Each structure stands twice: as C-alpha cells, then as structure tokens.
Image (cartoon, grey):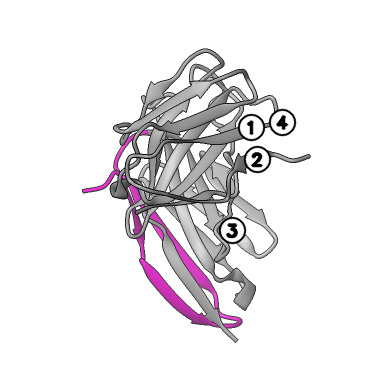
Amino acid sequence: NAGVTQTPKFQVLKTGQSMTLQCAQDMNHNSMYWYRQDPGMGLRLIYYSASEGTTDKGEVPNGYNVSRLNKREFSLRLESAAPSQTSVYFCASRSGDGRSSYNSPLHFGNGTRLTVT
Amino acid sequence: KNEVEQSPQNLTAQEGEFITINCSYSVGISALHWLQQHPGGGIVSLFMLSSGKKKHGRLIATINIQEKHSSLHITASHPRDSAVYICAVDGETSGSRLTFGEGTQLTVNP
C-alpha cells in the first residue's frame, strides 16, 4: 500500500522556470491538498480539491495552478518560479468531500524540497 | 492571533519524562488532529478526536470542547519521540480545509 506518492523529492529551479509537482494516492480518497511549509510558519494551504473535478484556492494560491486529473492524481504547477516559492511542498489526502464525513485523518506524501535561485 | 495556537514552541526533556504539548483554538470545530513530523520531514497522523480522550501506546490525546483546548501527552518519553508535533483543526464552517498550528519542536535527550 503506497499511500500518497509525491515526485520529485528534490528540485532546483532558476527564476522563471516552470515545473509540475506530481501527487498520487491509492486510497480512493476524495479530498486532496497541496501545502507549503516554511520555517516558523507551519503548513499553509495552497490549493485543495474536495472531490474529483473540483479545485479551490487556499491561503497562498498566487503563482500556482493545480489539476485534479482524476480521483488518484492532483498536480501542482509553478508556471514561472520565484525565489519566494523556495519551500517544502506536501501533498495530502483524506476520505470525505467536505460536505459529509470530512472528519477523517490526513495522509501525507514525503514532501518535495524546492529551491528557486 | 492565529486560530490555532500551540505551546510551547520548543520543548527539551530528559528520557523518561512525562511530556505535555498544548493546543488552543478559537473557532468551533468538528475535529482536532495531532500530527507528528520526524526530522526526516515525513508527516504522520497520530490522532483525530472530537471529544474525550484517545490513547495509542505511550501517546494520549485529550480535548475539552467547551474550553477549546487539547493536549498531547507522551509518557515515558524516549529520544525517538523527538519530532515536531502539529495540531490542526477541522473548523465547523471550513468544509474540507484544516487550520494548522505552527508546531512544537520536541527534543528528548538520553
């Protein structure tokens, strides 16, 4: 049981480059999330998807786009990377769609450490 | 003021000590989560609770809904308990979004 799989684990970009962070879960979860974690700031929500076919902005969506490709996969794209996007990115998932049964534990990927120079 | 506040921010203990980490929140919630982040970076869910108390091994989580407060206790602490412990809440009106505290860095020395 792989759980939540995130790729890549590490990435270095130059300012202005683009990249896509991939996330897939094999637990048939409805809700998927992208967070960033910066020192002293805790986890901050970038985007989330409460169910297949829907996506919503979180606290810090600027500079990012997402795609819920299917129920398993939720990707995060940086179109033009900036040094302020240097961070550790986590994908997470859980069952429930926000309208019912959303009180379920989160399952996290192992994170992507992104550096933008 | 953050919706979810944890204390202390940093905690150093000797092996064997009883440890308490606190979480206070200011919104109505439907559930509260305790997470653990190891030095390698991975995050795992320890507990999800909406009332009372839950226990798993040496870890105990309690919640007082009226006081909007939760505690995470570790009995007989061990160096392998060294990690960041994060509190998060499901707000009653937040749908599937959670609000996170900033975490408590715990170091247990042998």
- Kindly indicate whether the residue at mark 4 contacts the one at mark 1 (C-beta within 8 angstroms): yes
Asked whether the residues under marks 2 and 3 belong to the same chain, the reply is no
Task: Tell me the amino acid under the disc marked 4.
Answer: Asp
Q: Nearer the viewer, mark 1 or mark 4?
A: 1
Which subunit holds the residue at mark 3?
A: B
Residue A5's tag is 2
Relative horizontal placement of residue A89, taking residue B102 as reference (left or right): right
* Image height of B107 relative to B59, above or below: below
Q: Position of residue B28 (x, y in %)?
A: 35, 34
Provide the secondary structure element on which disc 1 rests.
Answer: strand
Residue under pointer 3? B60
* Image height of A109 relative to A28, above or below: below
Residue under pointer 1? A24
Real-space CA distance between mark 2 and mark 4, rounded to the nearest whole angstrom: 9 Å
Residue under pointer 4? A26
Q: In this view, which residue lies farthest toward the top?
A: A53
Provide the secondary structure element on which disc 3 rests.
Answer: strand
Provide the secondary structure element on which disc 4 rests.
Answer: loop
Task: Determine crowd level at label 4: few under 14, some 14-19, many 20+ residues with C-alpha closer than 10 A.
Answer: some
